[in-house]
Image: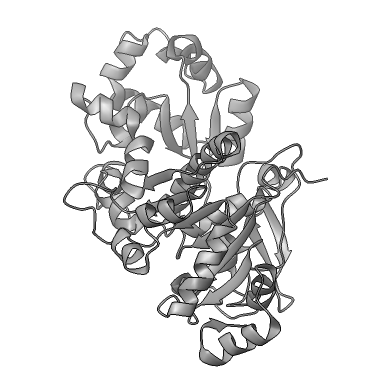
Amino acid sequence: MLHKPLEGVKVIDLTYFVAGPGTAKILADWGADVIKVEPSFGDPGRKTGATMMMPIEEDANPFYTTYNANKRGFSVNLKCEHGLEIMDKLLSQANVFVSSYRTGALKRLGLDFETLAERHPHLIWAQVNGFGDYGPAKDNPGFDTVAFWARSGTMLDIAEKDTSPINPPIGFGDATTSCSLAGGICAALYHQAKTGKGQKVMVSLFGQAIWNASSLIASTQYGDEYPKTRKDAVSPVINSYKCSDGKWIFLSILEYDRYFPTLCGVLGREDLINDERFATAVSGKKNAPALIAEIDKEFAKHTQEEMIQILTSADIAHERIQHFSDVISDPQALENKYVVEDTNRDGSKTIYAMTPIKFGNIEANLSRTSPLIGEHSEEILKEIGYSENEIGDFIQEGVIAVSK
C-alpha cells in the first residue's frame, strides 16, 4: 500500500511552468488533493515540451505531465468578479495556496499574502519567485535560466575552465527549488495543525542556487577559484577520466593517503606510490597536472567496463559518467522506481522521472496523465456548493472552462 501522509490536505495550485507545478506535484504525490487552477488557455508550460522534441497534445504531453500528474484540473477566469468569488470560496476551504505568479500580479488579483491572511488566517500562502522579495531585482521575471543559473555563478563556474558558460538544462533549477518549497509547506502544515493558523512560505530560484553552491560561496572567500579544469582538479583522485572507448568515469577518492597506493596498484603503477611528487594528499594536490596526466594514460588503456571492474574490485569510489538518456535503462533507477513507465491518454508510453521522496515503500504514485484544462471544474464547483444551474451559467458566461 502506498503511504500518503498528506491525505486530507487541500492545495490550490496557481502556478505555471516548472518550479511551482513541481512543488504541488510533490504534495500531490504525498497524498494532498491538489487543484490545478488555470486560465482557459492553460498553463504556458503545456507548450514547453515542443522545444525539447516532445509531443504537446492533449492526449500525450510528457513534459507537462511530469510536473502536473496526480492533480485535478480547474479553469477559472480570475479577471471577472464571479471568478474571483469562486477562487475565494476555494481558498476558504483549502489548507494551502501555492503560486509562482509575481507579487504584483497577485496583488492586482487580491491574492497577495496580506489580503488573504486577513480573509483566511488559516491559510498557508506559499510562493516561488525568481530573486526574492527584496532588493533591486525583486520584480524581475525569474526563470531558472536567469535566476538560478546565471546570477548565482552556477552557469559560469561549473563549466570547464576557458570554455563557454553552461547551456542550462530546462527545469533543472526549478525542480530543485520545488523540493525546498514543498518541505517549507510541510513545516507550515505542522504549525497549522497545532495552532490553526497559516503563514507565509517563500523560496526563490536565486536563493536556492546560492544554497546549492553554499560550500563554494564560503571557499571562494579564501582563495578557491572557479571555474576549474579537470587538468588541474581540486584533487587528482576526485576527477573525470576518459577510457579507451571514449566513455568517461568519475573517480572520487576522498581519503587520498589511504587509497592512493591501492589505486596505483590496480592501475599497475606502483612506481607512483613513493614518488615524492604524489606520495601525500598535499603533494598530490600541488602536482595535480602531472599526476592527472599519468592517470589519464592508464585509463586510456581500458574500456569503461574494464575500468569499472578494476575499480570495483579494489572498493574504490567511482561511477560511470552517463547521459540523461542512459538513466531510463539504468537498473539502479529502475529497481528503486526513480523512473517508471506510464501510459499516456493516447495509449503511448513514456518513462517518467518520479518525485524523489517516498514513504514506507518504493511504489511509484502513478497517474495516467496530467489533467486537461478544466477537466474537473464541474466536479470541484459541486464540492464547494454550487448548483448545476449556477455551473451552467458560469460555463456560458466564460467564468469557468471545462474540458471538451
Residue that extends furthest to the left in the rendered view of this protein:
136
Please tell me whether residue 373 is drawn above or below residue 212 in the rendered image. below
Asked whether 196 or 153 is in front, the reply is 196
Q: Position of residue 392 (x, y in %)?
A: 64, 88
Q: In the shown orientation, is residue 329 left or right of residue 264?
A: right
Q: In the shown orientation, is residue 112 left or right of residue 32?
A: left
Q: Position of residue 188 (x, y in %)?
A: 51, 39
Residue that extends furthest to the front in the rendered view of this protein:
119
Asked whether 254 or 93 is in front, the reply is 93
Please tell me whether residue 80 is drawn above or below residue 66 in the rendered image. below
Whether residue 233 is visible here, answered yes or no, is no
Asked whether 369 or 295 is in front, the reply is 369
Looking at the image, how many numbered discs can be counted on the residues?
A: 0
Asked whether 2 or 209 is in front, the reply is 2
Q: In the shown orientation, is residue 270 left or right of residue 374?
A: left
Q: Position of residue 3 (x, y in %)?
A: 75, 43
Q: Position of residue 88 (x, y in %)?
A: 50, 65
Please tell me whether residue 67 is drawn above or below residue 311 in the rendered image. below
Image quarter of residue 350: bottom right
